[in-house]
Image: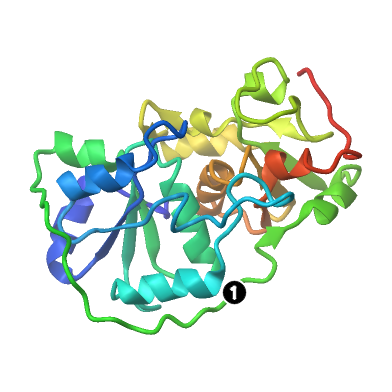
Amino acid sequence: MTNLIDVVSLKPLLAEGIRLIDVRYKLGGKEPNWGKEAFAKEHIPGAVYFDLNQDLSAKPQKHGGRHPLIGMQDFAKQLGQFGINKASKIVVYDDNGAAFAGRMWSMLKYIGHKDVKVLDGGYSAWLEAGYALETKAQKYKEYKYDLDIQKDFLVDMEYLKNKISDPRAVILDARANSRYQGLNEHLDPKAGHIPSALSYPYSDNLVETKFKSKEQLKERFKDFDKNQEIILYCGSGVTACHNQLVLDGLGYKNLKLYIGSWSDWISYPDNPIETGA
C-alpha cells in the first residue's frame, strides 16, 4: 500500500527530517482534550499535534455536517507555523486504526501535498516496538505553505444527489453496517443511508488496528473499475477518508469525497433516505 508506512521503516527516517503529525482523538465528546493531553504526556519524537475539532474542522452550521472542513488558508497557516512546507515528507498517525489520520491525509492531498503517508498501526505500534518517545514539543522554523487546491477532490450535496441514479457512479458508505441499515443510529438525528449507496465500513479495511494486506484490500474492492467514479461518505466526513486512503493506494483514479456526508445529507429535509440492507 503506497500510502502506508510501518514503524520499522519510519524509525530511521526520524534522523532524516521526516515530519510527524499526531492526530490522536477520542470520539464521543466526553473528553474533548484527550488527544492534546495524550500528546503533551508523550508522543513520537518530532511530532506536532492537530486536533480533529479545533484544527481540522470548522464550527458546524445548519448545513455542512458535523465536521465541516476548516478554511484551507487557516489550515495552511497552521502547517507553516509548525515548519511544514510543500516539500516536507509527512507521516500522520493516531491511535484509532487511522480513523483520524485518514482525515489528515485527505486534507493534505486536497491542498496538493505530494509526500504524505499514514503510520500503519499508529501510536500503539510504535509503543509495541519499544521505540523512544518524547514529552516536549519541538520548535520549528516557520514557513509559508502555498496551497494547490485539487478542485475535483470534493463534492457537495447537490453533486451527489445528481449521481444517485447514475449507473456509472458508485457511492460508498464507510459507517458501520448497522448505521447504514438504520438499525443503530447513535450520532445523527435520522437513520439510514443515501439511496443507491453501498455499505463498505472503513473498519473492514483493518485487522484490529492495522491495515489488511494489499492483496486482501484489492479483493475487497475488486468489483470496481479503477477509472470509475467513486463517491465516498460516512457520518461526518472523517472515516470516509479511510476508504479514500485505501482506494487511492490501490490505484483508483476517480475518487470524490462528500465531506458533509450523512450529517449534511439529512440536514436537507427533502433529501431521500433508504434503510435496510
One can see residue 84 in this view: no
What residue is disc 1 on?
149
Q: Nearer the viewer, residue 220 or 255?
A: 255
Q: How is the image coloured?
A: rainbow
Q: Locate the C terminus and report the quarter of the image it occupies.
A: top right
Vertical order, 55 against 199 (above or below): below
The answer to whether residue 276 of the structure is visible from this angle is yes
At x 34% / y 54%, what residue is drawn?
92
Q: Amino acid at mark 1?
A: Ile
- Residue 41, horizontal then vertical, whole percent: 16, 45
Q: Is residue 231 left or right of residue 111?
A: right
- Residue at the (78%, 38%) spot, across then down: 266
Relative to 137, residue 223 above or below: above
Q: Position of residue 274 (x, y in %)?
A: 83, 26
Q: How far across and down, in percent of the image, does residue 240 sit?
A: 59, 43
239 up-or-down from 276: above or below: below
- Residue sitting at 56 percent across and 68 percent down? 71
